[in-house]
Amino acid sequence: MAQHFPQVTLLITHYNRSRSLINLLTVFQQQSTFGHIIVSDDGSLSSHIKALNDFKKDVDFELITTEKNSGLGNNINKGQDAVKTPYTLYVQEDFEPDASFSTHFLNALQFMEKECELDMVRFYAYLKYPYLKPYQKGFSRMLIKPWYTNYRKIYYYSDHPHLRRSSFFKKFGRYQEGLKGDRTEYKMCVSFIKNNGKALFYDDYKALFTQVNSADEPSTMTRNSLTNSNNPVIAVTRYFYRQLKYNFDLLF
């Protein structure tokens, strides 16, 4: 039987990937239900909007639409504005939760309810966060200090699946709009660190969600080709650039 979380809203951002979204909601319904489900759409084609409206007969959710594509920042902002519950589980449409997710999610929610200083619990990442201190039940506390040298410290925050307080904007501000998705995420990373965010990180960070990018609905996120280049010269230059830029942005 699915576990019910009445104090949590599942917030999903969506753009032209209705099959992926329907899959995500279908899998969630088998294991977890929520006080509310909000799908914030970023100006998808009418065929995708129709598919989502048709799916409402199977899963009850609120679909928030917009007339034109306005970017990730706007899409998260308008979705979060509609949340009425104390907690928000944020997931992008191209993820699928593991069968064990509800158990670990319950633990995360209890941590948030017990420790009022916690702002977020993270469930997924591409890479393990470099500075962690063991906490409880497979989670670690994320650490951040000015003298930490691993540039990945900037990813203290991430748009990947996480639980957060719905009052998130009051402490960290709204997502910046009018930027590419990766820049929007970066700006929130900086704000989260500057405003003394506190977060937990699930140690087995690839176990609770699978990111599904099918051939018919590929990822819509694009990144600079230099970001992940393996060229040694580019890699060294990128390392020093990141050290300077990230520390400058965190100081000013």
Image: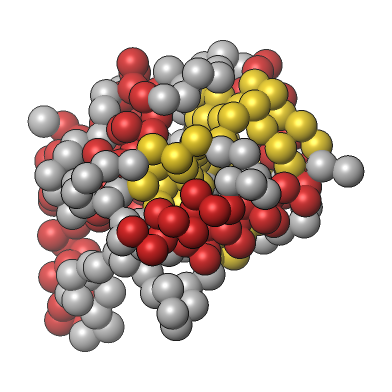
Q: Does 96 sit left or right of 73 as displayed? A: right
Q: Is residue 44 visible?
A: yes
Q: Where is residue 223 drawn, in percent x and y?
A: 23, 67
Q: Where is residue 156 drawn, in percent x and y?
A: 40, 42
Q: Does 48 sit left or right of 252 as displayed? A: right
Q: Is residue 150 above or below residue 163?
A: below
The residue lying toward the viewer, choosing from 161 and 156, is: 161
Q: Where is residue 227 drawn, in percent x and y?
A: 22, 70
The residue lying toward the viewer, choosing from 201 and 22, is: 22
Q: Is residue 111 visible?
A: no
In the image, what residue occupies the spot 44% across and 56% down? 50
Residue that lies at the very extreme toward the right in this rendered image: 1
Q: How is the image coloured?
A: secondary structure
In the image, what residue occupies the spot 52% across and 66% down? 19
Q: Is residue 96 above or below residue 88?
A: below
The residue lying toward the viewer, choosing from 14 and 198, is: 14
Q: Where is residue 59 drawn, in percent x and y?
A: 65, 45
In the image, what residue occupies the spot 19% across and 37% down? 176
Residue that lies at the very extreme toward the bottom in this rendered image: 231
In the image, what residue occupies the spot 28% across and 74% down? 228
- Residue 60 placement: quadrant: top right
Q: Quadrant of the N terminus?
A: top right
Give the mark count: 0
